Amino acid sequence: MDIRENVSLRDYSTMRLGGNARYLLEIHERQQMAEAVSWAKLQSLPFIVIGGGSNIFWQDTGFDGLVIVNKILKYEDFAEDDSNHYVTIGAGENWDSVVQRTVEVGLTGIECLSLIPGSAGGTPVQNVGAYGQEISNTLTTVELYDTQTDSFLTMPGYDCGFGYRTSRFKTTDKGRYCITALTLHLSVGNPEPPFYAGLEAYLEEHHISEYTPATIREAVIAIRSAKLPNPAEVANNGSFFANPVVDNYTYTQIAADFGDDMPHWEVDNDQVKLAAAWLVDKAGFKDFHDPETGMGTWPNQALVLVNEHAESTAQLLAFRDKIISTVQEKFGVTLQQEPELLP
Ligand SMILES: Cc1cc2nc3c(=O)[nH]c(=O)nc-3n(C[C@H](O)[C@H](O)[C@H](O)COP(=O)(O)OP(=O)(O)OC[C@H]3O[C@@H](n4cnc5c(N)ncnc54)[C@H](O)[C@@H]3O)c2cc1C
């Protein structure tokens, strides 16, 4: 095993901040997952499995253990009949390349998840979703290495505890399972309207009336590229705050002060979801560049915090806290961070 020592973790987070890993290993085969975990256990060291680093950022103190970077490649398309395909993907595959491959052969099911950065193995962890699709809609099984029993197992999608941007892999069983592959059930055919509002609007505006996996993928890519920075060029972790859910009373208070045009979605009779981007924007952080911390917000989407020239995670955290406290003071709402601070 090619275990490297004292490796900078900046290259293993799209926010490009953080200290060093004591040990780091890139694995390319399923069996290496078992070997890597066993090696860490023998040294009594903690270990973390990561993919593309698009939903994580690291402490300045780094990680005093073994970081296992999943690079396991695999792509197998099994056609059960004329319309049903089961695609098995290695967890280290680049997610968007997977979407592209499925779309190219006319499969529908994950085209709306185009251009989400990171690895295939990262997608079940927070049940990634965009434009009305979630990975849980098509995921039939996940192949895992169970670090408690030291054995491989196949878990059906319905056992993964999927919810909105969550799963058992980031809650009750956090750190227990290492994902090595997933199988998706996709269909030959075309996606059918109605589509998610933003996508529908784009299709109408661009007079696109032929709905194929390819036209929908192109539309999603165009919308996302106009709104979000490419993490290969601009250091960021995507949406930094989750949309907060507040009670009806809090919502009515804010709406009375700031107008009914505030974007919101009714969750149930008692709760309303607010747009975190709107709150950050209205708190004065639209296209904001902070000389003190070297952090800023992306001009087209205030929810995306970008590392312009920050040198430490402490600076990012200071900027984060500045936003949280300003939003709290102005609206009485506490924003929750989405990407994970490791370890
Ligand atoms: C510009 C941008 C846009 C984004 N847009 C979206 C979006 O539209 N929708 C959305 O849902 N997310 C979005 N994200 C978040 C992110 O891309 C996804 O969560 C992605 O699936 C993370 O994959 P990753 O491989 O980078 O995981 P990492 O960031 O490497 O890891 C994330 C978590 O998963 C765990 N993990 C990763 N791989 C494995 C594995 N093989 N086994 C066990 N645990 C593992 C890690 O330990 C960590 O806890 C966006 C991010 C960016 C930067």
Image (cartoon, grey):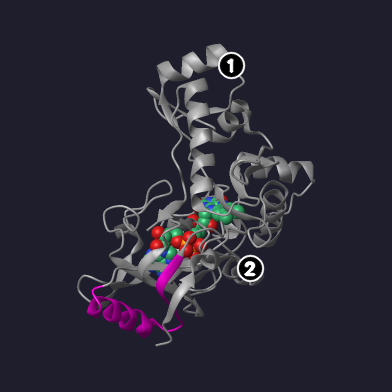
Query: Relative to 82, is 61 above or below?
Result: above
Q: Type of residue at label 1?
A: Phe
Give residue 169's quadrant in the image: bottom left
Say whether residue 141 is visible.
no
**SS for tag 1?**
helix
Would the CB of label 1 be found within 8 Å of ligand 1? no
Q: Is residue 142 visible?
A: yes
Would you say the beta carbon of the disc 2 residue lies within 8 angstroms of ligand 1? no
Crowd around label 1: few <14 · some 14–19 · many ≥20 (10 Å): few
Q: Viewer-proximal residue, 110 or 36? A: 36
Q: Mark number for residue 300? A: none
Mark 1 vs mark 2, foreground winner is 1
From the top left corner, tell me how far across and down residue 63 is, in percent. Answer: 38, 65
Count numbered badges in the picture. Answer: 2
Tell whether 150 sits left or right of 298.
left
Measuring 21% from the left and 70% from the top, which residue is drawn there?
Answer: 148
Q: Is residue 287 left or right of residue 275?
A: right
Image quadrant containing the C terminus: bottom left
Numbered tag placed on residue 258 in the rendering: 1
Residue 26 among those drawn in magenta? yes
Give SS at disc 2: helix
Q: Position of residue 55 (x, y in %)?
A: 49, 56
Identify which amino acid the numbered label 2 is placed on: Gln
Pick whichever of labels 1 and 2 is earlier in the sequence: 2
| Residue named by callout 2 | 100
Q: Quadrant of the N terminus?
A: bottom left
User: Magenta segment range?
Assistant: 20-44
Q: Position of residue 297 (x, y in %)?
A: 64, 42
